[in-house]
Amino acid sequence: MPLLNKPDTIGDSERLERLRRLRGLMAEQEVEALLLGSSESLRYFTGLVWHQSERLLGALITQDMLHYMVPGFEKSRVDTLPHLDGDVHVWQEEEQPAALVASLVGTRGRVALDDALPLFIYHSLTRELGQERLCDGGPLIGNLRIRKSPAEIAIIQYAMDLTLEVHKRAHSVMKPGIAASEVIRFIDQQHLELGGEGGSSFCIVSFGSATSLPHGADGDQTLQAGDVILVDTGTRIDGYHSDLTRTYVMDTSSEEFARAWAIEREAQQAVFDAAKLGVACSALDDAARRVMASHGLGPDYRLPGLPHRAGHGLGLEIHEAPYIVRGNTLPLASGMCFSNEPMLVYPDRFGIRLEDHIYMDHDGAKWFTQPAKSPTEPFSS
């Protein structure tokens, strides 16, 4: 049964406002048109959901028009799907969609390209338009998508709450002898039961030394008494992702694990405490590494220690800007949403990842979910 108080989906009014802001940026940067492929940005601006294939299906945005480019045999299906109103142009199997784009943009002006377009589409566009007319549309798109609206944050919050409940249910079935594959199936079913789109969007369940591999081990595993357990999973609501990790033991924690768990939690808190409006993303990664170094871990990416960035942005894609990583000078701004997961790895022994997410409100950082309580209590309540 889905959770109560599910927020409204993103509506046409918000998508039209996104287009208005996009067109303002295009005018500032003297861009005549922006071509979207079958990417999450197509969904963001138009509401149309389509998966990338060898055929171009996308949208061309100009200052006064929204054009859809659709393979002829797919038009009937596109007509049934939610999307903003616009002119639909079909191309047939023997035709080149790049030629259709060229006919719509004319002979003048720069054309920005969705940075998720495949390379083969780029090459076909260079033949039709010339390389000098094409430019990277990633910054245009990214400047809008990186700062979530209140409606987007409400959807992500709901998705996080849903996955947190699934984590609690998964914790309740952990027992010696259970297979990781069985837990993965259970988590998928619980996501479905609670209303997650398609069940789990991903799921990692690791036991024992396999927890030291950040993205899990090949093959199945069986939980043994005393094993460290790592569960990392998420789902989607209205296209927006959840993503939560808990690492724990079921009964009494060893002194070694309890000490390491406390370091991981200290590093996670340091990331949150460093998350201030206007602060560079890199400062948060630095804060986590300072904690590790103070305990004799690392430095840098050396192990035992933190082998990867401290976090990633999240929204319609599970990994998107802003990236909480060394060298990223991008300042934090209201509406940014990102993970806080400075994983601590002891090779061939165990790894601890405590992953919760943060959003930047007008007055600073807020947790989507409250961090874990202890090595044997993975939930704060």
Image: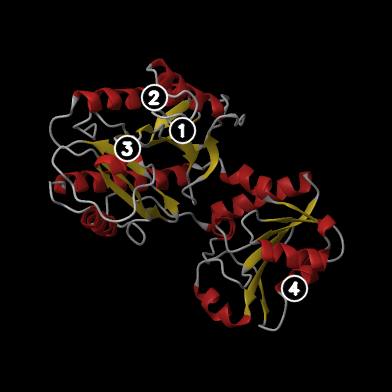
Q: Name the residue under label 2.
A: 267
- Badge 3 amino acid: Asp
Which one is nearer the viewer's eye here, 358 or 343? 343
44, 248: nearer the viewer: 248
- Residue at position x 27%, y 50% in the image: 4
Answer yes or no: do the residues labelled 1 and 2 have beta carbons within 8 Å? yes
Quadrant (top left, top right, bottom left, bottom right) of the C terminus: top left
Answer yes or no: is residue 119 visible: yes
> CB atoms at circles 1 and 4 under 8 Å apart?
no
> Mark 1 or 3, which is nearer the eye?
3
- Which residue is labeled 1 in the image? 310
Q: Would residue 40 be found to the left or right of residue 32 on screen? A: left
Residue 250 drawn at (x, y percent): 16, 37
Residue type at mark 4?
A: Leu
Q: Which mark is residue 348?
A: 3
Q: Could you say whether the residue bearing mark 2 is in a helix, strand or loop?
A: helix
Left or right of 294? Residue 246 is left
Residue at numbered disc 4: 100
